[in-house]
Image (cartoon, coloured by chain):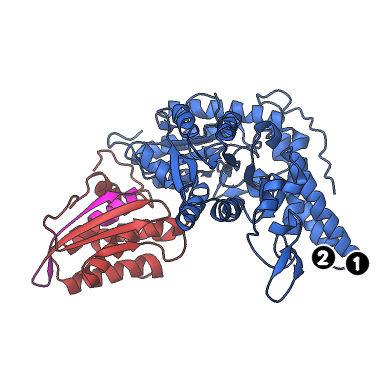
Chain colours: A red, B blue
Amino acid sequence: MTAGASPVEDELYREIILDHWRNPRYRGHVDPADVTVEGYNPLCGDEVLLTMRMHDGSVEEIAFDGHGCSISRASASMMCEGVAGRSVADATELGRRFKAMMLEGGTADDLGDLEALQGVARIPLRIKCAVLPWNALLEGLQRGGGTVTTEEGPQS
Amino acid sequence: MSISVPPRTTARGMLSVAPGFDVEAVRADFPILQRRVGDRPLVYLDSAATSQKPVQVLDAVERYYRESNSNVHRGAHTLGNEATELFEGARRRVAAFIDADPRGLVFTRNATESLNLVASSYARELLRPGDRIVLTLMEHHSNLVPWQLAAERAGLDLAFIGLTAEGRLDMEVAERLLSEPTRLLAVTHQSNVLGTVNPIRELADLAHRCGALIAVDACQSVPHMPVSVRELDVDFLAFSGHKACGPMGGGVLWARPELLERMPPFLGGGSMIQRVELDRSTWAEVPAKFEAGTPDVAGAHGLAAACDYLDAVGRDRIHAHEQALTGHLLEVLDEAGVDIQGPRTLVERGGAVSFTMGEIHPHDIATILDREGVAIRAGHHCCQPLMRHLGTPATARASVYLYTTHAEIDALGAGLLEVGRILGPPGPRR
């Protein structure tokens, strides 16, 4: 956190987002990993690599790597913080609620730090940045690995 | 159909440093430049993606639909004749704009379709397994993927000219590759990412000497400087009308007419046939052979009006204005401490300038600039192999056109300060 931060917070670049961007948590690789998922945004070329080790129906360890904007990195960092040690069912539910907030204007109640990303939902072109790591997470939890993209249609 | 452009005299020449060029008078022709983004005036620095349209072009399109709309090359009524004359007149006008034989000018939907036409009807159909196509590392996906498709289907080889540290074609590699058996060189005239202007005439000579043809992606050059297919001695040239003040949905392919005659059709349907039997057909003369279905008559007419407009302003003067702007842009970016990707001097360089800002992602740069009213492009610019070469997933890109002012470049500089304030290294805030 910055000493002397401006009293009025930036509506998009909230301090908590900037903090996760500058000091990402859970960055790296789980090795060995039970689950490896690549997330890819063909619009901008951003990539996230998510690795997890599962134990007894829970996310025992999780880490992310790749390159992306402040929003996608902060989202991935907060996501890992939110699901580490949680059961697959809890992690899946968190992912569902986060995506509902971003994509369907759902409420941000009880999402903790993740609520800071609500400002992104007002910028349609940036929503995909925030959602990309979560698509990777849900893919990994449901199918045990693979590749996801932010797009289903054709890209330039 | 000719659009007259009033003489440009005004007391306000302050912002233009190119002699004889009055940017404020030009701006008055572009209605969209009056709008605001949020509470800020629009600063449009994304003309390399698409240009804005002058009222002369908007009027031409509207007048076509109000007064002459009809299908072309069919029927004998007055409107049909008018529309056909406008369409064929547009073909002659656009051909003249690039100093070309109008028999080789095909209207397409966009430059991507133009290049796909050549890749399909020339490379895939007329080349043989093992034949080689030479490309470069700075090509837009539209001048890369069509050749990949053709290569896969026809068993062709692809080879690539690399880049120098400054972001120019490595001409030693070009000379080596083009001294070996090659059938086609496909190359951009001006990189949409680096701004590099490639030596097309020199490359055409090298290609022809080894028996190859040359196809040029001129999307970033035709709008900004005089381009002559005769002087460049090229065989195929593609560009998009919408980057040259024309309507969206209009692209151009120019090809040597004798090549078009040898090439089989790209799309089949109405207008491109001579005689149709149940089991076979014969083709119309070129260029109609490559224009299946109802064309975008209004778009072609609008592009002709854009050619009139750009020539009335003067492409030499536009180029001089853009060179002055690009020099200022390079200075402002340098002062902002960003990393310019591509040539840092005005030598053989156009007004699309890409840059990166260390750890700050280009999307964040673009989002913050947008809040200041400044529109730039961020991303891979449909050049993923080039991004990999540059070692970055994306760049930010500012690009200028005839209506851009020095003050707008300064607004970009101020916006970059804001980017640094929000996303720069932590520390006491300014």
Query: B229 above or below A16?
Result: above
Q: Is A68 colored magenta in this rendering?
A: yes
Find disc 1 in the rendering and name its residue: B77
The x, y position of residue B208, in whole percent, is: 59, 34
Q: Looking at the picture, which amino acid does disc 1 mark?
A: His
**Where are the magenta residues, as a range?**
A55-77
Name the residue tied to disc 2. Answer: B70
Image quadrant where residue B334 sits:
top left
Mark 1 lies on a secondary structure that is: loop
Q: Is residue B411 visible?
A: yes
Do the dots labelled 1 and 2 sit on one chain? yes
Q: Residue at left 80%, top 65%?
A: B71
Observer-nearest of A45 and B201:
B201
**CA–CA distance in space, label 1 to label 2:** 9 Å
Residue B278, position in %: x, y? 70, 76
Left or right: B380 with respect to A92? Answer: right
Q: Is residue A139 magenta?
A: no
Q: Chain of mark 1?
A: B
In the picture, measured across the screen, residue B28 lies left or right of residue A139, that is: right
* Front residue of B334 and B146: B146
* Residue for point 65% across, 30% down: B319
For badge 2, the amino acid type reads Ser
Quarter of the figure with the C terminus of chain B: top left
Disc 1 vs disc 2: Cβ atoms closer than 8 Å? yes
Residue farthest to the bottom? B278
